[in-house]
Amino acid sequence: MSRQKRVIMAVIIFGSFIYIVLTQAVHILGGAPGEPVHPEIRKFCSSASRKNVNIEYEDSNLPVIYVVTPTYRRPEMVAELTRLGQTLTMVKRIHWIVAEDSHTCSPPITSLLDRLGLSYTHLASPMPEVYRREKYVPRGVSNRRAALQWVQENGEDTGVLYFLDDDNAIDIRLFNEMRLTQTVSMWPVGLIGEYTVSSPVVKGNQVVGFYDGWPAGRKFQVDMAGFAVNIGYLKKQKKVTMPYIAGHEEDGFLKSLNLNLKDIEVKADGCTNILVWHTRTAKNPSRTLRLAHHQATNIKPLTDNMRKMGRLTMSAEQRTNLKFLVQLGKTPSEALGMLQKVYGMRQCHAHVFLSGARGSKRAGRTWKMTPGVEDPQRAGMRPMLSVSSRWCVTIVG
Ligand code: UDP
Ligand code: MN
């Protein structure tokens, strides 16, 4: 090796060493718990500022409610957002911020937002990989943080910020309750936790504590759907944040607002009514598609549409073919490309990587599948999958 090459190698090795030491030092010494060490990726996709076309008269003096909905790609995503979005069409002066846990914005969501006729902003911000690997994953934090930044930069001071997850159910009367929030307002959330309800404890119209099945040392024992914040008040706070700590997102956020219990505005008839529920949607297991006899029927475009909206599985036939192609010496991307050609998986952005499993007795037979670059938020979530067992491919449009 020439002297020049040796110097370059030494610089690279030394540089990497310094980088690792510094990032670890920042991790250990610096930053409050739950604060990200690496830069977060944020992508602004589109926005519309308009009158709600579904409502005849909208008083432009009413404060705007900025509803932040984190979401992520899965078969239920379009269904959840359609239901929630259509509820929001009934409400005056709403700006809906849909923030995807992803590198990119999903086209079916873009067209939904366009159709609904609401003011909206569509963002994407993938969860950093380091949190994806944690035992308790802080779900929806990166995307909520991106939306928070958007609200801090673009929200009207008279407006109100409200976090509403994509699977929750809401009574539109709650928006009237929260619209005139001056600092932070709170109310009960139904269908949650040990007590099936989570609520501030109120005495003489003041919050004196919390009734919640999971205290966990939290100062503010509330669910994400149980409070709203005035934007002018939010903007006055020095360091607003939401920590990447599962279960402590709300508490961390509210603490960062320097909020005292006595400042909380009590809503929903002194916290006696339930106007929002922490409902959850059952996960739909992946199903196998058999398309061999349907290349010329409606089933083909139907399943193409389903692929654009979520996840489909490979059929046993496709699995066998994939295995066969790999045994013929095709590279994974060649093999997948051929399958896409035959089965018309034009929307398939997933890449299948096949490799002998290290340490496996059946090395070479057990194939590892990791998701492709288009959908990195799923990375690290899938275990090794054997070809003969369940095998699914994430296909996103
Ligand atoms: N979410 C997300 N990324 C994920 C998992 C969840 O953005 O990897 C979103 C999800 O769409 C929902 C919110 O974060 O709006 C809370 O997630 P979930 O409903 O799964 O959590 P739980 O109801 O158990 O708090
Ligand atoms: Mn949920």
Image (cartoon, grey):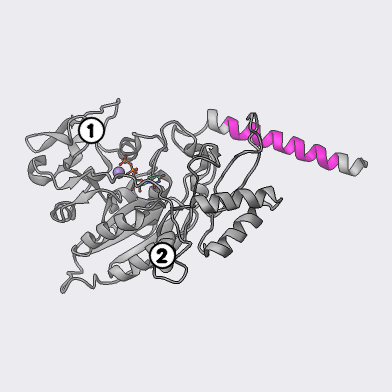
Q: Residue furthest front?
A: 293
Residue 78 disc label: none
Give the x, y percent position of residue 10. Answer: 81, 37
The quadrant of the image that shows the N terminus is: top right
Q: Is residue 219 above or below residue 335?
A: above
Give the x, y percent position of residue 300. Answer: 43, 66
Q: Which residues are magenta?
A: 7-25
Callout 1 amino acid = Gly
Q: Name the residue tied to disc 2.
A: 305
Decide whether the magenta segment is chiefly helix, strand or loop.
helix
Image point 17% across, 69% down: which residue? 59
Callout 1 secondary element: loop
Image point 17% across, 31% down: which residue? 195
Q: Is residue 334 above or below residue 276?
A: below
Q: Is residue 236 left or right of residue 93?
A: right
Callout 2 amino acid = Asn
Callout 2 secondary element: helix
Marks 2 and 1, how far apart at CA: 36 Å
Give the x, y percent position of residue 241. Answer: 39, 42
Residue 331 can be seen, yes or no: yes
Neighbourhood count class around disc 1 (C-alpha, 10 Å): few under 14, some 14–19, many 20 upward: some
Does the segment drawn in magenta span residue 32? no
Q: Name the residue tied to disc 1.
A: 193
Q: Is residue 293 above or below residue 378?
A: below
First in sequence: mark 2 or mark 1?
Answer: 1
